[in-house]
Amino acid sequence: MTQFNETDLTEAVVKSFDSTPNPRAKFLLQELVKSLHDYVSKTGLTFEEWDYAIDFLTRTGQKCTDTRQEFILLSDVLGVSMLVDAVNHRDREGATQTTVLGPFYVGEHKVTAHGTDISPHNQTGEKMFVQSRVTDLKGKPLANVPVDVWHADDDGFYDSQKPNYDEVGASARARFITDNDGRFFFRTILPCSYPIPTDGPVGEMIVQTGRHPMRPAHVHFLVNAKGFEPLITHVFIGGDKYLDSDVVFGVKDDLIAKVEPRNDPEMPDGTKASGTWHLMTYEFHLKPGGGMAPKPLGVRATEPA
Amino acid sequence: MTQFNETDLTEAVVKSFDSTPNPRAKFLLQELVKSLHDYVSKTGLTFEEWDYAIDFLTRTGQKCTDTRQEFILLSDVLGVSMLVDAVNHRDREGATQTTVLGPFYVGEHKVTAHGTDISPHNQTGEKMFVQSRVTDLKGKPLANVPVDVWHADDDGFYDSQKPNYDEVGASARARFITDNDGRFFFRTILPCSYPIPTDGPVGEMIVQTGRHPMRPAHVHFLVNAKGFEPLITHVFIGGDKYLDSDVVFGVKDDLIAKVEPRNDPEMPDGTKASGTWHLMTYEFHLKPGGGMAPKPLGVRATEPA
C-alpha cells in the first residue's frame, strides 16, 4: 500500500509498530496512535493549530533545566499527573493519600538534625513547627526512614526558582531520618499559596484560558521506607482559599492539616518562640510494598543516606 | 470540591477550562483533557511509563534547533502530520495531492534562475533534470509563482543536517519563479532514499520498536500562488523500494513520478550531459483558495520574493 489516505492511515501507523519487541511498549504506542488520530479526526485540527501545538511542545521542552521541569508542570495542570497517581493507587485503605510530586523535587535533600530550622534565611515568614510520625498501617512506628521535605517560601517561590540558588543553596528543603518512635520534627516558616511559574508556555496557557495559576499552601513529603510503597504526598494548610481549585488538582481531604496558631513561649522541642507561631501535626501511614522513589531532578541530587 | 478522586478528576479538569475566552481553544483543550485521561485510564499508565514520557518529550524539545524540528519528526512518524494534512484536504478533485512538510524546510530558498544546477558541490550523485509546470485545475498555466524546492543529497542528508552548513550554505534547496507558460526547470542530482535522523529521541523510538527509519527518495515542492491554496507536497522517485513503507506515511500514488534514465548528450535546456542522467517531469495543479504557506524554520529564512 502506497496510498496513505485518511481511511487507511491510522491502521497503517498502528501496524507499523507490530514488530515492537516489548509487548507493553507495543500496546502503549498503538493505543497512543489511535488516541492521537482520534483527536485529530474528531477536532478537525487545522494546520495553524497543529503548528501551535508543535511550537508549544518545543518551547515546553526548551524551558526545562536541571531545576525546572515544564513538562511535569504541563502534566500537572492537565490533571494527568493526578490521574496517573490515582490509577496506580487504587487500593489504599488506611494508608496516607498520595498526590503529585510536582516539578520542584530538584535535589539537595541533605540529612538534617531534628529540630533544625530549615528556613534560616527567611526573616519575614511566620514561624512554624512541624511534628510528624511515620507508621505502618497498624500504627507501628517505623524507625530510620528517610523523609524528604520541601516547600515554597512565604513569597511563593521554591529555593530552586530563585536567582541566587547557586550561592544560597537549599532552603526549606531537607531530609530527616525518623527516630525509634518513627518521629521527626523541624522548624520552618508557614508556606503560602503561590502561583505556578507563569513565565513559560504552561503558565501562558493557564493565563490565556482564564484559569487562576494558584496552588493552596502545602509542604511536600516523600517518605521512602524499606518494604513499603514510597509515599509521595503533600500536607495542605487548612483554611487556604485555593483548596477547592488547586491548579494541579492535587488536594485530597485527608491531606488537609489543621495548622494551629500558638502563642506558647516555647515550641514542643523547647526552642524559644516570640509571638505567634504555627503547629503542624501530621502522621504518615505507609502501605507495605516496594517500588522506586523518584530521583530528584537536578544535577545537585544527593544519594539517599 | 477538594477531593480530586479518579472518578471526579477528569470532570474537574475539563471544567477548569470553562472560562477559556476563545471557544475553539476551549473545545480543543477540553477534548485534549478527555483524550489524555482516557489514554491514562485505558492503559493503566505506570509511574515509570509516565516518567519515560516526560523525559522523552523533554529530550524531543531540547533536540530542536533553528535547523532541526524533532517534534515535527515525531508527529510525522506517528502519522499525525499526514492525518492533519488529510482532514484539511478532503476535497481535492483534480488538484495535486498534498503530503507532509517534513522537518527540513529550514530557509535559504533564494530565487534562482531556471536551469541552474542547485547541487553544484555534489561530485558523486547521478545528474537529474527536473522540468515542471504549474497550472490551475483547468490546465491554465500560472505565471510568476514562487516554487520552493528542497531535497536530500545522494548520501541521504539535507544541507542543513551537515556539519559544514554554516560555511557551504544552501544546497539542493532553492526557489524558482514560473515563467509565462507556468514552467520552471533546474538541474540537480538524483536523491536517494534515506533514514530520518536516528540520533534523537524519535529515531531511538523507531529503532527500538523495530521499524525501519527510511523514507523513499523524493523532492519537496512548496508551490505558493496568489489566489490558490498553498501546495505542500513531494514528488517521489518511481521504483523506490520504500514507497510502500515510508516511515512518515507520506506517499500517495499520484505523487510518484516515473523518473527516466536518459543517455542523450544534451539535457532539455541544451546543457551538455555525459553518460546517464535522469529526467523528472511533473505538473502541479493548484486548487483555488487562500491560506498561508508555512514559514521556513530557520533564522536564515529569506522573505518571499
Image: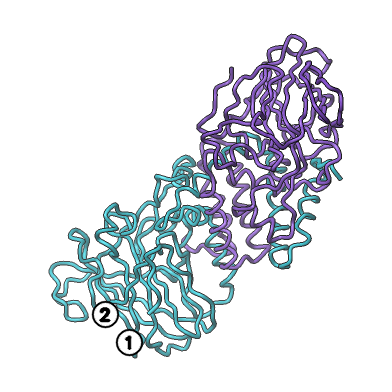
Chain colours: A purple, B cyan
User: Which residue type carries mark 2?
Assistant: His
Image coords of residue B76 (percent x, y): 49, 57
Q: Is residue B277 above or below residue A194?
A: below
Kindly identify the residue that appears in the image at 81 percent across and 27 percent down. Answer: A280
The quadrant holding residue B285 is bottom left
Image coords of residue B12 (percent x, y): 80, 50
Give the labeled residue for mark 1.
B179
Check disc 2 and report its element: helix, strand or loop: loop
Q: Nearer the viewer, residue A237 or A190?
A: A190
Q: Nearer the viewer, residue B70 or B185?
A: B70
* Label 1 chain ID: B
Residue B114, disc: 2
Task: Judge from the rendering whether residue B254 lies leftward or rightward of residue B278; answer left or right.
Answer: right
The quadrant holding residue A94 is top right
Q: Nearer the viewer, residue B206 or A82?
A: A82
- List the single residue furthest toward the front: A274
Question: Mark 1 near mark 2, Cβ–Cβ under 8 Å?
Answer: yes
Q: Nearer the viewer, residue A152 or A300?
A: A152
Q: Can residue A134 be seen in this snapshot?
A: no
